[in-house]
Image (cartoon, rainbow, N blue to C red):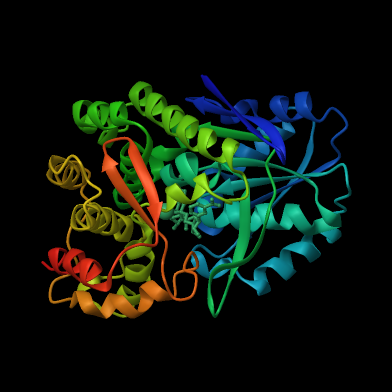
Amino acid sequence: MTEVQVATPGGSYAIKVGAGLLPSLGAELKALRPRVTQILIISDETVAALHGSAALGALGNAGLSASLVTVPTGEGSKSLAQLGALWERCAEAGLDRASCIVALGGGVVGDLAGFVAATYMRGIAFVQVPTTLLAVVDSSVGGKTGIDLPQGKNLVGSFHQPILVLADVDLLATLPEREISAGLAEVVKHGIIRDPGLLDWLEQNAEAILALEKGRLSELLAWNCRIKASVVGQDERESGLRAILNFGHTIGHALEAVVGGHVAADGWVHGECVAVGTVGALVLSQAVGALQEPALIGRTEALLRRFRLPVRLPDGFESKAILPYLARDKKATGGRPTWVLAERAGSSLLTADVTEAQVLTALAYLEA
Ligand SMILES: NC(=O)c1ccc[n+]([C@@H]2O[C@H](COP(=O)([O-])OP(=O)(O)OC[C@H]3O[C@@H](n4cnc5c(N)ncnc54)[C@H](O)[C@@H]3O)[C@@H](O)[C@H]2O)c1
Ligand SMILES: [Zn+2]
């Protein structure tokens, strides 16, 4: 088991990564909160069917009183309706200020359950038990919680740090291949913005990772938690540095907003859109003159392909269709997105100084 410490003004806690960790959930929780009362596990229907009873057992065996509530699987559950229903469930289950919520699931459950914990009784403790690769390396670290509105994703939320993240790699064994790949897009992103050694390592260990070889998978996950923890530790509330985590996401989010209805795209998931957005951000970095290491483009594409991720837009997709969505990016000010660009492997910068012609060059490169 590897432990990564997260230290932010909003709270300090451990991320524990390794195999066979879920059975120790009860003991871990008791060590952190000796007087914990009721525990409510929040999960989605898919994850609850696979791992719900193991999580309940882990708490029950430690003599803790726990119940499980599920929401439908999918992004649609990050809604005001589910939030309201969960608040009421908390009250019905008798949760008080000394209670704890356990988020058992991917980023959807983590964001939603975390926001329930942030708001119920003005904030109670919560533990993240991430069950997707993306949730381990990204959404469970850093304390962003929230829900979507019909008008846009993640429009309502709060910063609320968990008291513990327990990342058991055994739980990833049931994850569909496509979700493994999606999470790896964020891992490649971490390498590009912060850590050239990570890219080298990924090139040497790609097959072991795709095969979910537990030792190397645990090493990779802990490494990425460390990268994200170091960024959010320096900038919990995203007043500066944290924005670099948005690398590949300006085009990625725009693509996510448009491919939904595009037949050829077959409903791409977030990580797939980020993979294409990552290539776009690298090509844009070159067009702007920021990229000092042009070979990074081909290298990244090769790595993303090995991870079964797309590196071009869906067939027949016109890149210009993305343009209007870029200005709507949440990180845009006055219609101008702030871009995260790469200088070389492991080094990134933020700038709004990018022309539409340069963006169009990058987008055209992405056409299949
Ligand atoms: N808070 C943050 O900092 C942050 C960062 C990145 C993303 N996010 C959010 O995370 C969400 C995406 O997270 P995600 O990709 O984990 O999606 P998700 O939670 O929807 O999980 C993806 C799919 O995998 C299934 N699943 C989860 N664990 C499984 C397992 N162990 N075995 C089998 N199936 C399993 C889920 O039921 C779902 O169908 C988005 O809402 C996004 O906004 C938040
Ligand atoms: Zn992402």
**Residue 181 percent coordinates (x, y):** 30, 47
Residue at the spot 72% in from the left edge and 37% down from the top edge:
11
Quadrant housing residue 91: bottom right
**Residue 129 percent coordinates (x, y):** 58, 40
Q: Is residue 155 left or right of residue 341?
A: right
Residue at the spot 81% in from the left edge and 57% down from the top edge:
120
Please state the total of marks drawn on the protein image: 0
In the rendered view, tell whether residue 122 sits above or below residue 138.
below
In the rendered view, tell whether residue 196 sits above or below residue 130.
above
In the rendered view, tell whether residue 160 sits above or below residue 226.
below
Q: Is residue 358 left or right of residue 96?
A: left
Residue at the spot 23% in from the left edge and 28% down from the top edge:
200
Kindly tell me whether residue 167 is visible in this rendering.
yes
Q: Is residue 329 left or right of residue 159?
A: left
**Residue 260 percent coordinates (x, y):** 34, 75
Kindly tell me whether residue 69 is visible in this rendering.
no
Residue at the spot 16% in from the left edge and 64% down from the top edge:
366
Quadrant housing residue 24: top right
Nearest the camera: 326 or 307? 326
Nearest the camera: 327 or 265? 327
Image quarter in which the C terminus is found = bottom left
**Residue 230 percent coordinates (x, y):** 52, 33
Nearest the camera: 104 or 257? 257
